[in-house]
Image (cartoon, rainbow, N blue to C red):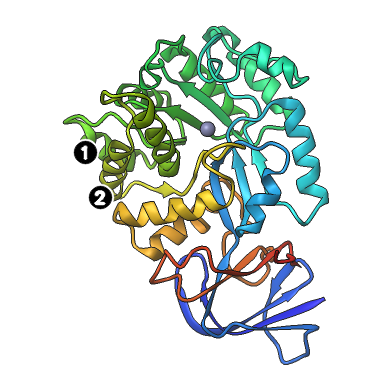
Amino acid sequence: MRTRISNVRVFDGERRIDRTTVLLDDDRIVATDDASAEVEIDGSGRTLLPGLIDAHTHVFDGDLARALAFGVTTELDMFCLPDVLTAQRAAARRRDDVADLRSAGTLATAPGGHPSQLLAAPEIAALGLAPFDTIAGPEQAADFVRARLAEGADYLKIVIDDGSVHSTSLPVLSEQTARALTAHAHDAGLQVIAHAITESEVLIALEAGVDGLAHVWTDVTGGTDDLADRIAAQDVFVVSTLVYFEAITGQRERTADCAVPGSFDDAMRVTRALHRAGAPLLAGTDATPYVPAHGSGLHRELELLTAAGLSPLDVLTAATSRTADRFGLSDRGRVASGLRADLVLVEGDRTTDITATSAIAEVWRRGVRQVRR
Ligand SMILES: [Zn+2]
């Protein structure tokens, strides 16, 4: 089955091409020729983008379908319970009406550490699922990483969060444990992504040698610019998740009458500092079955990244090729011959107006044209 998209403006993952033709043959993008195609799409007035990649989500039943409807063709899950992950992986492999999936599997946190306060053992049992592994000290790091490899983890997520941003106090991984986990994961060929929410937690993650941060941090002090410079110098990527901070700040303002750390405004300030420093930003939402939403949340994230000073082209790169490169997804993230036909066609010129977001005309996943509802 061949599909030709003609007269279309293309964002190829890095640059804008004003008017061109893109040809799909089954599940691949191929070099154009003059032979006929079964499906002809008029791309006039529209922009063709690589399928979007959300670099921070949590996947439950139904989420991957919702993501794909909004042009998010790949989700990078940052913590999924083992039984849930097995089912979602099978769906992503078998079906073409859901987004593709990579996952950290079980995250590394101290016994009772974040997110145990949100997802306690009784709640997990109520879902009919087993409690998740935790790690008490560096001597357990080798076994912990081995268990993640057995789970099929694509990377390791570690949690360095003492609870202060959640207005509580939680057990947290020691610096030695963070370092041991990172070393063992790297030996096993896994990247390490840290959840760290304050400057001091980010410093622990950087000292441990992590490859990326799962959020921007949200306590703004005089040290923000220096820390951003260090992250840029170490070439550590940062997943933005601004829409997550926007969602939780809104909830807090409704329930608390005093200022709390971890605000959206601080997250925006840190993002601006990272952008100024030239640190590699990846677009991600921290989407869950609640808020932010899968799919639509990423479009809001792109708007917020623009508000933080990134150009529309830079924002699109942060949601496509840069994330693919950082996560070793060499078969996607670009509109180029030979790559997977994961594509989204939007109305208008997304390379100059990122807010033309919800106007999705077509989505292809592995070359399969999605039914628009
Ligand atoms: Zn998360």
Mark 1 burial class by Cα count in 10 Å: few <14, some 14-19, many 20+: some
Q: Nearer the viewer, residue 146 or 282?
A: 282
Tell me the element at label 2.
helix
Specify the quadrant that holds the C terminus: bottom right
* Mark 1: amino acid: Asp
140 in relation to 85, above or below: above
Q: Residue at x 73, y 26 (%)?
A: 82
Q: Quadrant of residue 186?
A: top right
Q: Nearer the viewer, residue 122 or 268?
A: 122
Residue where numbered disc 1 is placed: 225
Q: Residue at x 53, y 15 (%)?
A: 117
Q: Quadrant of residue 28?
A: bottom right
* Mark 2: amino acid: Arg
* Residue behind label 2 places its C-beta within 8 angstroms of ligand 1: no
Q: Residue at x 81, y 41 (%)?
A: 90
Q: Nearer the viewer, residue 266 or 27?
A: 266
Q: Are marks 2 and 1 in contact (CB under 8 Å)?
A: yes
Of label 2 and label 1, which has the lower sequence position?
1
Q: Nearer the viewer, residue 369 or 61?
A: 61
Q: Is residue 24 left or right of residue 18?
A: right
Residue 331 in sight: no
Q: Tag on residue 276?
A: 2
Q: How far from the left and from the top, in percent, is residue 125?
A: 73, 15
Q: How far from the left and from the top, in percent, is residue 273?
A: 25, 44
21 in relation to 117, above or below: below
Q: Is residue 199 left or right of residue 195?
A: left
Tell me the element at label 1.
helix
Q: Residue at x 58, y 11 (%)?
A: 135
Most extreme residue toward the bottom is: 34
Mark 2 burial class by Cα count in 10 Å: few <14, some 14-19, many 20+: some
Cα distance, mark 2 to mark 1? Answer: 9 Å
